[in-house]
Image: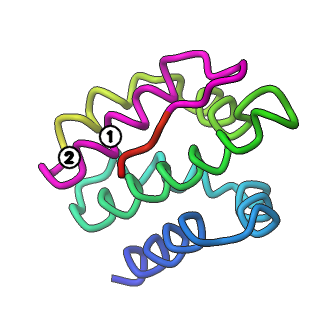
Amino acid sequence: TVRSEALWAISNALSGGSSEQIAALAQLGCARVLVDAVGGDDARCRACGISGLEGLLKAGNAQLETLGENTYATEIRSLEGVAWLDALEDAAEDAARDKVEFIRKCMLVDVRGPSAVEGPP
């Protein structure tokens, strides 16, 4: 579908884009789109949403040294809190479980301070 292709493009940009490109996507509201995708019924859209959130949160972890917080995690928390995480875990395919665990840690652990949450290999 067009939606899954758009989510795929966002996910790719978040996993391989520059910090400026990622910041631009965040300003355009990609976090809301990704959270909505992981809560949807389409498995491909959920997978893209999971990958996109992982990329966004990893980029946010890189902000810790300069900003002292992962602003993307803060933004995601402000959208839906963390209630959607349980549904995310239930919907994740085996291949995405490491990504889901990374997302969960970023959302539930206060990542302020010197150590960021390590992502899956």
Left or right: residue 84 compared with residue 93: right
State the SS at label 2. loop
State the SS at label 1. helix
Q: Amino acid at mark 1?
A: Val
Chain part drawn in magenta: 93-117
**Residue 12: percent from the left, percent from the top?**
51, 73
Q: Are marks 1 and 2 in contact (CB under 8 Å)?
A: yes
Say which residue label 2 marks: 92
The magenta stretch spans residue 7: no
Q: Residue at x 54, y 65 (%)?
A: 15
Q: Residue at x 65, y 50 (%)?
A: 59
- On residue 100, which mark appears? 1
Depth-wise, is mark 1 or mark 2 nearer the camera?
1
Left or right: residue 92 compared with residue 113: left
Mark 2 Cα-neighbour bin, 10 Å: few <14, some 14–19, many ≥20: some
**Residue 116: percent from the left, percent from the top?**
60, 30
**Residue 1: percent from the left, percent from the top?**
33, 82
Q: Amino acid at mark 2?
A: Ala
Viewer-closest of 42 and 13: 13
Q: Residue at x 69, y 55 (%)?
A: 29
Q: Residue furthest left?
A: 94
Q: Residue furthest right?
A: 66
